[in-house]
Image: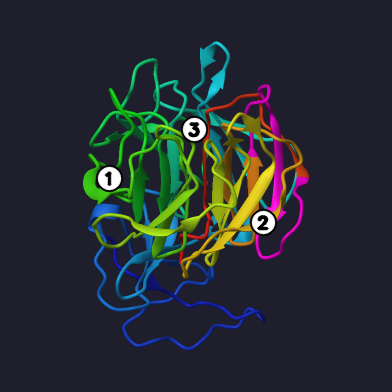
Amino acid sequence: MSSLKITNISNKNNNSGAVISGISTVSSGNFTLPSGTTGQRVGIESGSLRYNTTDNILEFYTGTSWLAISQTSTSLFSRGLFGGGLVSPALQNVIDFITIATTGNATDFGDLTVARRSLAACSSSTRGVFGGGYAPSYTNTIDFITIATTGNATDFGDLTVARPSLASCSSSTRGVFGGGLTVPTESNVIDYLTIATTGNATDFGDLTSGRRTPAACSSSTRGVFSGGYNPTITNIIDYITIASVGNAIDFGDLTAASRTQGGCSSSTRGVFGGGLAGPAVVNTIDFITIATTGNATDFGDLTDARYLLAACSSSTRGVFGGGYSPSKSIMDYITIASVGNATSFGDLSAARAYLAACSSNHGGLL
């Protein structure tokens, strides 16, 4: 790992500042920070600063974990990604991206390692992770992308159980995948991974009941899974503490039993939109306060009723994209801290359902 070298940093009037003992100077006004790979990180004390050559980002040490200093870690520059899905009859490997604070159509980012549908996604501020799905059989594939760049995904490792129709949430360091469909029944499996590294997922615990097609969101400490199907549509909401391991605990109920929703969050509020409520395709949006327990409350309506959609968020805005009723390319957005109906955002690169989404500044990040 390279050492810090600062030389002759000039002020705004182009006058040289004081020379700090033991540090040389340069006239350019630039300085070289310590740098190295993710694996070479050493947190000596809170406030340690370095450049991460694995993810190409500036980061600092809080005393317990490394966090990114990057445009992509602020609400203004938050990037959302939508990956995979189905454009009937073809499975998709496409990844689109948007800038969440703006509106407009999505832009091509790259491709997943495997074309698939019914997958799940989670993220840190720098890295997005896509796991599971149907491709065209049940898969345990996990792959990742660096959010601030564009390009194709890279293999990360494997889930503990191959399954589609699962959900995922994350903190700034850990991604958690829950539920899904296994042969011959719905799964209650929860597994987790450390987002900054690569490798196979590890068993976390169990959901309160096995189910497929739940939705999920998180704060920086708590993950929440809502709805799903087994063997009927359910209104269950349960939660986990992301930094620990163990079984999920009952949180409360959705306003109506629903499955195939999209879920997103700020650091305090979780939002679930769309889905199937019995045979009906709905535009309903519910919200919860993540730090408490209790039943969900009505938030408003999506611009269009649909199911099998995905959602991502910044710390202030949620974006719902894609879905089926029939297949949709539309995206719409909400302001998470308020209540009210969603507003049109733009379109995905193609109309598709069964997709997954993540972002660089969601509610699970510090």
Q: Locate residue 162: give its quadrant.
A: top left
Q: Amino acid at mark 2?
A: Asp
Q: Residue at x 65, y 32 (%)?
A: 280
Q: Amino acid at mark 3?
A: Gly
The span shown in magenta is 321-343
User: Mark on residue 151?
Assistant: 3
Q: Earlier in the sequence, mark 2 or mark 3?
A: 3
Q: Which residue is mark 2?
A: 298
- Measured from the top left, where is residue 294 in percent x and y? 50, 65
Q: CA distance from mark 3 to mark 1?
A: 27 Å
Mark 3 nearby-residue class (10 Å; few <14, some 14–19, many ≥20): some
- Measured from the top left, where is residue 28 in percent x and y? 53, 68
- Measured from the top left, where is residue 3 in percent x and y? 29, 67
Mark 1 nearby-residue class (10 Å; few <14, some 14–19, many ≥20): many
Q: Is residue 282 above or below residue 58?
A: above
Mark 2 nearby-residue class (10 Å; few <14, some 14–19, many ≥20): some
347 or 38: nearer the eye?
Answer: 347
Q: Amino acid at mark 1?
A: Asp
Q: Which residue is mark 1?
A: 191
